[in-house]
């Protein structure tokens, strides 16, 4: 397994940005589900 | 033509650094007390709306914590306890932290208003403003009473939880607010006693730095004495049952005993490992968790 400290800065940057994008996608998906659920409840 | 060597472009902040801006450990207490405030209410809450309310409380707390770290980045760099945070450690720029804090704060208030109630959103907005502006920017660098007044920020979650369930402010949420309000000074001053040098290095006027250890210990005791009747008030005023009353009495008595040890038996520089202070601080966290848990238990078991 690659030691993160052996990564060059460009590779580190790519990994950090990829990690942030995944976290953001998860949050956005969660918000979509949440707003859908809120809409269902409010319609009752 | 000479050219200066190219400056390395700083790496972007990792998502974990953004998460740490929200002070997750503090957020757990906020979530818990908010949830207890909601569950202690005498009306059922729709699970989805209840979840949204607690989520908004948590995100609002996270937003105000991020703004706190944005404002205090320079101070945090001077304290051992906080020097490893993303901003003082150079892992994030201040603009990102500020914008992240604002986004969380505004988003949480908006969603609370749309999904739960305007009143809950208004109280949440005020609590965020209270912590980020009144406490962090105004009071903390100016007065040793910063914790006394600023402690109000941490007292809002159970009130917001109650309002999210009932839609109104009544006696009980005010009492819950008062419990945390009076709990905050002894909790933080116990901490300040054993990290005093950190606060002094940063120039923050915490009570032990300004007024000295003896005065701080006396004041911890005063608040511990006040906490007993305030914690008992829900039982005495008939808004909580005997299970809560007995728990509040026992828990507050232990708190008072530990505060007494800090105030009376620590009069000289004998036991310098600060064990009574650390014990009181650790117990104060447990105190709040158990007290609020018993409030909920009382609601469901005693009624």
Image (spheres, rainbow, N blue to C red):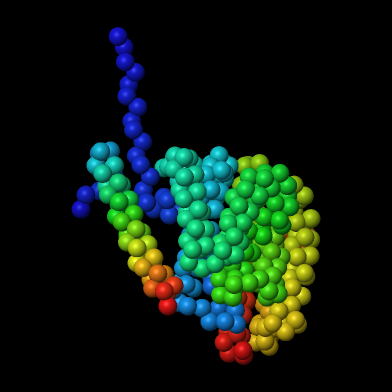
Specify whether B258 is left or right of B114. Answer: right
Can the viewer see residue B157 in this picture?
no
Q: Residue furthest left?
A: A1
Q: Residue furthest bottom?
A: B302
Q: Quadrant of residue A5?
A: top left
Q: Residue at x 39, y 65 (%)?
A: A35
How many labels, in total?
A: 0
Q: Position of residue B22 (x, y in %)?
A: 48, 55
Q: Quadrant of residue B223?
A: bottom right
| Quadrant holding the C terminus of chain B | bottom right
Above/below status of B286 relative to B14: below
State the residue at coordinates (59%, 60%): B122
Pick the front one: A18 or B86: A18
Residue ID at (36%, 36%): B10
Relative height, residue B106 to residue B228 (above, below)? above
Q: Residue at x 73, y 47 (%)?
A: B143
Q: Work out which quarter of the rendered image holds the N terminus of chain B and state it.
A: top left
> Where in the figure is residue B63, as x and y percent of width and height?
51, 53
Residue B102 visible in image: yes
In this orientation, which residue lies closer to the viewer: A26 or B267? A26
| Residue B153 placement (x, y as % from top left) | 63, 58
Which residue extends farthest front? Answer: A43
- Looking at the image, residue B24 lies above or below residue B166: above
B235 w.r.t. B164: above or below: below
- The x, y position of residue B221, in whole percent, is 77, 65
């Amino acid at each position: 397994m690659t030691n993160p400290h052996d990564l060059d800065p460009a590779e580190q940057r790519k990994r950090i940005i990829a990690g942030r994008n995944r976290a953001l996608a998860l949050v956005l998906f969660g918000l979509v589900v949440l707003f859908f659920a809120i809409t269902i409840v409010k319609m009752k | 033509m000479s050219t200066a060597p190219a400056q390395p472009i700083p790496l972007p902040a990792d998502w974990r650094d953004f998460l740490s801006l929200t002070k997750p450990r503090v957020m757990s207490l906020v979530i818990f007390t908010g949830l207890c405030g909601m569950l202690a209410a005498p009306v059922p809450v729709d699970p989805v709306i209840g979840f949204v309310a607690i989520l908004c409380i948590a995100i609002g707390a996270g937003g105000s914590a991020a703004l706190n770290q944005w404002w205090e980045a320079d101070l945090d760099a001077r304290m051992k306890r906080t020097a490893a945070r993303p901003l003082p450690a150079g892992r994030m720029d201040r603009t990102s932290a500020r914008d992240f804090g604002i986004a969380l704060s505004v988003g949480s208030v908006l969603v609370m208003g749309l999904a739960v109630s305007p009143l809950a959103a208004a109280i949440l907005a005020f609590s965020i403003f209270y912590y980020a502006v009144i406490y962090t920017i105004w009071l903390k660098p100016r007065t040793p009473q910063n914790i006394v007044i600023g402690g109000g920020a941490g007292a809002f979650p159970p009130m917001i939880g109650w309002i999210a369930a009932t839609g109104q402010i009544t006696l009980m949420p005010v009492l819950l607010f008062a419990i945390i309000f009076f709990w905050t000074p002894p909790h933080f001053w116990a901490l300040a006693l054993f990290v005093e040098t950190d606060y002094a290095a940063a120039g923050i006027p915490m009570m032990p730095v300004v007024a000295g250890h003896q005065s701080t210990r006396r004041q911890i005791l005063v608040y511990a004495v006040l906490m007993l009747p305030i914690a008992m008030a829900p039982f005495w005023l008939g808004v909580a049952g005997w299970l809560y009353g007995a728990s509040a009495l026992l828990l507050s008595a232990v708190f008072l005993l530990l505060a007494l040890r800090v105030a009376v038996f620590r009069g000289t520089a004998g036991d310098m490992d600060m064990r009574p202070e650390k014990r009181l601080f650790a117990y104060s966290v447990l105190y709040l968790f158990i007290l609020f848990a018993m409030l909920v238990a009382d609601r469901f078991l005693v009624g």
